[in-house]
Amino acid sequence: MFVISRNTAFTYQGKRVETKQVGRELGVRYVLEGSFRRLGNQIRVNAQLIDAETDAHLWAERFDGDMGDLFALQTEITSRIAVALGYELLSAEAARPTERPDVLDYILRARAANERSPSRDRNAEVIRLYERALALDPRSAEAQAGLAGILANNVLDDMTETAAVDMAHAEFLAGQALAAAPRSPGVHWAKGQILRAQRRYIEAIPEYEAVLASNRNSARALFCLGQCKLFAGLIEETIPLIERAIRLSPRDPRPGAWYSTIGMVHLLRSRTDEAVTWLEKARNTTPLHAQIRAQLAAAYALSGETERAAAELAEARRLSCDDRYTSLARLQAVLSYWGVPKVRALFEATYFTGLRLAGMAEQ
């Protein structure tokens, strides 16, 4: 995006000037303004995003910290503001009325739609918008990567009846995008999603690391990297990565998968009470996700709450696109890879045991 240099922006510092005037003089659509107050070693920063055309406030946030480590505080605040602005500006631009949408308009609308909580309807809308972008420009690497990523998400979220077809199409699109834009973080993101959907977690790790090399504030790349670390056997690295993602994007619209992964780490470590707490948060924020329901069923069962476990397992069966939650044999066949041997052993001792207690049959 086009951003005015701070040397120019600071010429308005301390002056009483209308946001609309700033917008006109600098040719910008949005203005980020703020202030800070210091009391002893404590500092409070207030920031707000304003539409320069309408003078409407789009977003505001307050940050509190300790002056003891000023550089760490500066990094934390600027990172969180950058992530928040990414969401807000994307939504604002996608909602801007356009008589004849072009490729970028459809891409922005697809990305904005993708910020909503996962559901089949949401995924279908995102796919439709990316397909419209590709209809206008079949060579758009960004649209190819975006469509590949959402097709992989369909498989990851168990929200498609045509998983094999979706994955084949995603791989084709990602291959084209990678050939056209090998350094694009969006392309590496799509490749990582495909590998993760194929349970090739160790191979996916470098793809997410490539995203973070370009954008260290990518909260979702941090989450996906953390999940890959779990299945690669580096379980102790998972929760810190996801906690960092949550700190960067505390109001992220899709936190269910983040909470559920933390919950699963606790479950695998036999910290059942903590697992229930996090998995309930995941269920409450993303109620239409079958996998989260099954994970919570196992946690409830291991806690002795068999009736609640059975209810969550029944909901997982209802929400799933196939019959994977009808038996352990079917679940293990559909998801044939559960991580390196030591992680697989933890799943056997906790998750699968919990599903048995919840009422899932062996065959």
Image (spheres, helix red, strand yellow):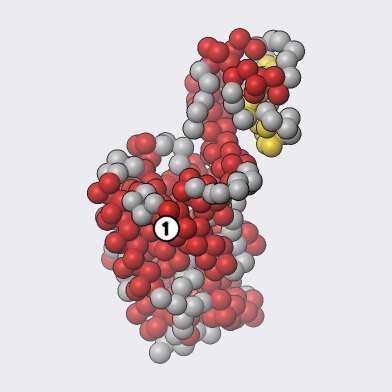
Depth check, front residue: 160 or 107: 107
In the picture of the structure, the residue carrying the numbered disc 1 is: 135
Question: x, y percentage for residue 27?
Answer: 59, 23
Instruction: Tell me the quarter of the image containing the C terminus.
Output: bottom left
Q: Residue at x 41, y 76 (%)?
A: 162
Q: Judge left or right: residue 356 versus residue 309.
A: left
Would you identify the image quadrant in which residue 91 lies? top right
Depth check, front residue: 239 or 286: 286
Q: Residue at x 63, y 17 (%)?
A: 25
| Residue 250 visible here | no
Question: x, y percentage for residue 133?
Answer: 45, 54
Q: Residues within 10 Å of mark 1 (few under 14, many from 20)?
A: few
Would you identify the image quadrant in which residue 327 lies? bottom left
Q: Residue at x 69, y 37 (%)?
A: 58
Q: Judge left or right: residue 319 versus residue 270.
A: right
Residue kind at label 1, given as amino acid type: Ala
Question: x, y percentage for residue 188?
Answer: 33, 48
Asked if residue 137 is positioned above or below residue 21 in the image, the reply reads below
